Image (cartoon, rainbow, N blue to C red):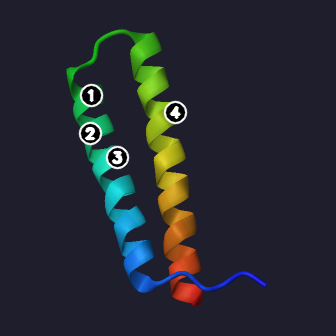
Amino acid sequence: MVEPRSTQSYDREIAIIRENIRQLMEQAAASSGAANEDLIADRIADQEARLALLLKQQAAE
């Protein structure tokens, strides 16, 4: 059986992901070139999906 995560654990990981998204947004604003923009957009989408999953898991506990 999996032990429930602590609120602090969720909060810590959520803060890290939000910081990752912020940094990726800054990179996107400074970036030029379609390849770079596509790569950054994919990374942002991945981080947003991880964030949504964590928030959903946190709300369920």
As shown in the figure, which amino acid type bears the numbered disc 2?
Answer: Gln
Q: CA distance from mark 2 to mark 4?
A: 14 Å
Work out whether residue 25 or residue 20 is closer to the camera in this orientation and state it: 20
The mark closer to the camera, 2 or 4, is 2
The quadrant of the picture occupied by the N terminus is bottom right
Label 2: which residue? 23
Q: Position of residue 48 (x, y in %)?
A: 47, 53
Q: Position of residue 43 (x, y in %)?
A: 48, 36
Q: Residues within 10 Å of mark 2 (few under 14, many from 20)?
A: few
**Residue at the extreme right of the image, as rendered:** 1
Q: Residues within 10 Å of mark 1 (few under 14, many from 20)?
A: some
Comes first in the chain, label 3 or label 4: 3
**Residue drawn at (22%, 34%) of the image:** 26
Label 1: which residue? 27
Q: Which mark is residue 21?
A: 3
Determine whether label 2 and label 3 are within 8 Å by CB. Answer: yes
Q: Is residue 44 above or below residue 49?
A: above
Q: Is residue 22 above or below residue 25?
A: below
Q: Is residue 2 above or below residue 47?
A: below
Q: CA distance from mark 2 to mark 3?
A: 5 Å
Determine whether, in the image, residue 4 is placed left or right of residue 30.
right
Comes first in the chain, label 2 or label 4: 2
Element carrying mark 3: helix
**Residue drawn at (53%, 44%) of the image:** 46
Label 4: which residue? 42
Element carrying mark 4: helix
